[in-house]
Image (tube, rainbow, N blue to C red):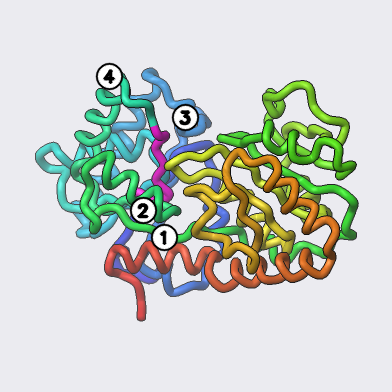
Amino acid sequence: MSGKTPHTIVVTIGPWHEKPWWWVQLEKSPLLAGMTYERISIDDRKHHQIGLAQMPALISRLAGIVRRARREGIANIITFEADMSCYLIGLLQRLPGFGGPRHTIVQFISADRPATAGARLKDFIARTCLRSVYRVVSSSRAEVAYYRERFGWSAAKCVFVPLQTDLRYFDLPAQPTENYIIAAGRTFRDYATLARAVAGTGIRTMIVCGKAGPGISPLPPEIEVVTDIPLEELSRRIAASRALVLPLFERRISTGQSVLLQGMALGRPSITTLTAGTEDYIVDGETGLLVPPGNADALRSAIQRVWNDAALATRLGNAGREAMARENLPVHYVHGVAHALGCAPA
């Protein structure tokens, strides 16, 4: 950072660490020249662990950041996903003396809800809190359309920027390919369809998920379940697999993208459900294979195609990796967000 006042403050909540992984990967980039980073750590809790007892401290810290931005003429405040900082800053900026800095939420995600009275009340509260927000950035075009419809946001307020993946995946040593396919993740995973797809094929299938397991029983003998492994070990197992399979339930919000982009960056041929979270990242037949939601026959056919055709697997894996390097690195994401804010360099 030079001695100049930054134009943007980036705020995250959680256990203390010096810098996010993507910030470290952009340290020498001119994109960070006008940005500064603030980490709010309260009792070493993750953002979803913040309760009523911690709320006064959180509000005080956020109020201090907003006042500082206003006092120093900092134009933008960026928060992530839909944690408490997003809603609290939104409310603070509706109070006298707190307006001024433009508040942007990146990687915004809000679960699609059934049309119940409780859901409508929660959406009313969200609309009220987020009315002062300048930009909402989502990682799916379909999701952007959904939020515009659901919250009544304008096209300018809610925008699409493709998600980023970790540059370090490209630097991992090559792994000897082992005879298994791998599926990973917890949220909105359709492991029942995957189980039906691989049953009777003899294709060893590894599911990596949380300690609660994949949520289906009984499992066919093809499936092995691995729970709660470190990210580094997951990366190694994906890199050694014959293919990454990402079975998803159909949702209007995006899900599964982090694992999908991880597998593509590691050069694995990717087979995934065609849904809001994946359609912006795979060109079917070129950078991966897309199958309809809940269709075990189509998923089985795609898995067998990749399993039995080494040339196809190599082509899909290489093309997916090249696409990630071309479009989905931290530099691309930060530039996309900066462009949405009108502060990207030429």
Marks 1/2: CA–CA distance = 6 Å
**Rendered view: 247 above or below 137:** above
Q: Are marks 4 and 2 in contact (CB under 8 Å)?
A: no
Residue 137 is marked as 2
- Give how far across and how far down residue 266 sits, in percent: 72, 61
**Rendered view: 143 above or below 117:** below
Q: Which residue is mark 3?
A: 48
Marked residue nearer the N-terminal end (1 or 4): 4
Question: Residue at 55% of width from left, 50% of height from top?
Answer: 274
| Residue closest to the eye, 68 or 113 | 113
Binning the other alpha carbons within 10 Å of mark 2 as few (below 14), some (14 to 19) or many (20 upward) gives many
Marked residue nearer the N-terminal end (1 or 2): 2
Which one is in front in this view, the residue at disc 3 or the one at disc 4? 4
Element under label 3?
A: helix
Which one is in front in this view, the residue at disc 1 or the one at disc 4? 4
The span picked out in magenta is: 105-112
Q: Is residue 108 left or right of residue 199?
A: left
Q: Main secondary structure of the magenta part?
A: loop
Q: Are marks 1 and 2 in contact (CB under 8 Å)?
A: yes
Q: Are marks 3 and 2 in contact (CB under 8 Å)?
A: no
Residue 117 is marked as 4
Q: Amino acid at mark 1?
A: Val
Q: Amino acid at mark 2?
A: Val
Q: Are marks 1 and 3 in contact (CB under 8 Å)?
A: no
